């Protein structure tokens, strides 16, 4: 029942009288009540009792935590790069609710917070890219060293170094700091790097030496070491070396008088 702007529920009935209580009584303990009585002539009289207190709202302190949340998100964004923006916003919102339990907390709207998190992450990545570009202007080459796990037939990154020059002294320093004793070494066909490998890893057989060990003619070795020949095998996928890479190189090479030696070399190359 609705009367004078208030909603009522039936509380009890006695004879011709019906007793109502304010609909908001359960939540606000409102004292407003209503009594209706039907007279013999059919007329219904309505009588209000008690005073309505449900329209008296409690003064709730509203704490503006938008700036505090912004600072927290800025710090958390740098530490929690793997958390999606929505979950990060929800977590920080709950932290602020727990921090101020007796106050209503005003936080950043969800969409605004998500855009802010994405912006901060883009800024962080852009800064890193800018620093990388700024500091790599003087570098001429990226030296990448990987190790081959024969048990699983996978290559694992050992280290990569940005070098300022492509000479034996630079490569010597790079290999000098490596603490590893591989059973074999395979490198690209760059003379400076090959010479460095001979000195630093003199007890390890290199694929480059195999060409001379098989007594392949010098002119064929020089041809094989020219750009776009054997070096191409170091940049194509591993599973394509034997099926596509080696046949391609063989089609470009002159193997006259050394077919058997080259066959032995490719067997050695694919095995190592």
Image (cartoon, grey):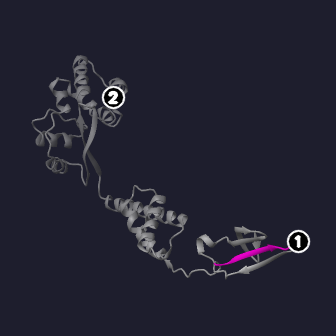
Q: Secondary structure at mark 1?
A: loop
The residue shown at (23%, 26%) is 271
Range of magenta residues: 31-39
Residue indicated by mark 2: 241
Q: Residue furthest left?
A: 203
Figure quadrant of residue 20: bottom right
Alpha carbons under labels 1 and 2: distance apart: 103 Å
Q: For mark 1, what is the residue?
A: 42
**Residue visible at 23% across and 34% down in the picture:** 149
Q: Is residue 14 left or right of residue 113?
A: right
Q: Quadrant of the C terminus?
A: top left
Label 2: which secondary element: helix
x and y, in percent, of residue 210 in the image: 18, 28
Residue 214 vertical placement versus 88 (above, below): above
Q: How many marks?
A: 2
Q: Nearer the viewer, residue 109 or 53?
A: 53
Vertical relation: 125 (above or below) 222: below
Q: Which mark is residue 106?
A: none
Q: Earlier in the sequence, mark 1 or mark 2?
A: 1
Quadrant hosting residue 231: top left
Rendered location of residue 237, percent (x, y): 36, 34
Quarter of the image where the N terminus is located:
bottom right
Foreground mark, 1 or 2, reads 1
35 relative to 170 in the view: left or right: right
Q: Residue at x 19, y 48 (%)?
A: 171
Please say if 98 is above or below 215: below
Q: Quadrant of residue 10?
A: bottom right
**Coordinates of residue 130 in the picture (x, y in percent):** 38, 62
Dot 1 and dot 2 residues touching (CB under 8 Å): no
Nearer to me, 251 or 86: 86
């Amino acid at each position: 029942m609705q009367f004078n702007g208030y909603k009522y529920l039936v509380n009890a009935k006695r004879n011709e009288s019906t007793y109502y209580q304010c609909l908001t009584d359960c939540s606000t303990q409102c004292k407003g009540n209503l009594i209706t009585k039907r007279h013999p002539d059919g007329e219904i009289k309505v009588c209000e009792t008690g005073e309505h207190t449900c329209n008296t709202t409690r003064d709730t302190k509203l704490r503006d935590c938008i700036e505090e949340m912004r600072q927290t998100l800025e710090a958390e964004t740098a530490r929690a790069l793997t958390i999606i923006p929505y979950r990060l916003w929800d977590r920080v919102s709950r932290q602020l609710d727990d921090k101020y339990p007796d106050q209503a907390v005003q936080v950043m709207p969800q969409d605004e917070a998500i855009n802010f998190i994405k912006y901060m992450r883009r800024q962080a990545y852009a800064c890193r890219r800018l620093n990388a570009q700024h500091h790599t202007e003087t570098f001429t080459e990226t030296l990448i060293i990987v190790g081959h796990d024969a048990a699983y037939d996978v290559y694992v990154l050992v280290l990569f170094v940005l070098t300022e020059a492509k000479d034996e002294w630079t490569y010597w320093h790079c290999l000098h700091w490596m603490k590893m004793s591989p059973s074999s070494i395979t490198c690209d066909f760059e003379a400076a790097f090959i010479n460095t490998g001979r000195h630093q890893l003199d007890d390890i057989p290199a694929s480059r030496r195999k060409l001379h060990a098989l007594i392949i003619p010098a002119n064929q070795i020089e041809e094989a070491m020219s750009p776009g020949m054997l070096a191409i095998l170091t940049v194509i996928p591993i599973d394509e070396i034997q099926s596509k890479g080696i046949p391609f190189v063989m089609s470009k090479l002159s193997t006259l008088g050394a077919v058997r030696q080259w066959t032995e070399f490719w067997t050695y190359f694919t095995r190592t």
